[in-house]
């Protein structure tokens, strides 16, 4: 009788799990580093802040490209490609919005957070099998991104919008990505232990 990882499907799932674990861990660490850098650079929407604002969705775009190349054909691959294109567009629009001040930045970031959060939920649902650890951190992170993006647009219309919330957003996203990576690592160890 073959073990779960001895079948072609099992080997493919193990490879995808390993690739996603590395990707999520890197993505989480980069998000935390970005949050730390942005926390000290956003008092004024100057060149440094705009550079960081553009960099954040570009990190997501590169992550989506890596994910796209590592993911087997399927609907989640198309959603990943869409999210990569969306994040690239968001980076360009954030660069323009940054010249207009805090409120336009929050509007653009909020719209991006809503749409990319929805895309993340869709991908998480597609991957929600036991082989990939049920994707709870990914689903929670995507749902929170969707909801928080709505609040950013409300805040942007207020009297005193602030970019403080973006560091919190990136920190939360980073933590959820790292949790998902740890969950995938735990799942890999669990499956290997079951094959002994």
Image (tube, grey):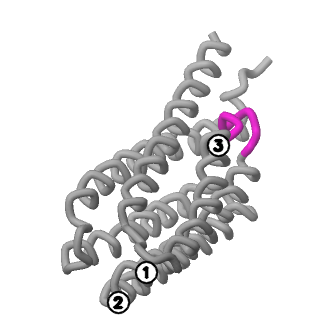
Which is nearer the eye, 33 or 154?
154
Magenta range is 128-135
The percent position of residue 144, horizontal first and vertical second, equals 61, 53
The vertical placement of 109 against 66, above or below, is: below
Give the residue number, with chain letter if any, for mark 3: 12
The vertical placement of 158 against 190, above or below, is: below
Check whether the beta carbons of the residues at disc 3 and disc 1 lie within 8 A of each other.
no
N-terminal of the two: label 2 or label 3?
Answer: 3
Give the residue number, with chain letter if any, for mark 2: 100
Distance, label 2 to label 3, CA atoms, is 47 Å
Residue 190 part of the magenta-drawn span: no
Residue drawn at the location 53% of the way across and 46% of the way down = 20
Circle 1 Cα neighbour tier, 10 Å, few/some/many (<14 / 14–19 / ≥20): many
Relative horizontal placement of residue 134, taking residue 155 as reference (left or right):
right
Which is nearer the eye, 187 or 92?
92
N-terminal of the two: label 3 or label 1?
Answer: 3
Give the residue number, with chain letter if any, for mark 1: 103
């Amino acid at each position: 009788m073959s073990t779960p990882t001895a079948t072609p499907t099992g080997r493919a799932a193990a490879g995808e799990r390993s690739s996603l674990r590395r990707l999520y861990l890197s993505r989480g660490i980069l998000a935390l580093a970005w949050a730390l850098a942005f926390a000290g650079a956003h008092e004024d929407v100057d060149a440094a802040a705009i550079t960081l604002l553009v960099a954040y969705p570009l990190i997501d775009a590169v992550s989506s490209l890596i994910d796209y190349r590592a993911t087997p054909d399927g609907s989640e691959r198309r959603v990943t490609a869409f999210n990569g294109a969306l994040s690239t567009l968001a980076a360009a629009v954030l660069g323009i919005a940054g010249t207009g001040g805090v409120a336009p930045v929050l509007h653009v970031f909020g719209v991006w957070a809503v749409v990319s959060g929805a895309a993340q939920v869709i991908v998480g649902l597609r991957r929600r099998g036991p082989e990939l650890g049920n994707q709870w951190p990914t689903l929670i992170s995507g749902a929170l991104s969707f909801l928080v993006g709505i609040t950013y647009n409300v805040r942007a219309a207020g009297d005193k919008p602030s970019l403080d919330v973006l560091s919190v957003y990136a920190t939360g996203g980073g933590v959820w990505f790292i949790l998902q990576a740890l969950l995938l690592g735990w799942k890999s160890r669990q499956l290997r232990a079951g094959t002994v």
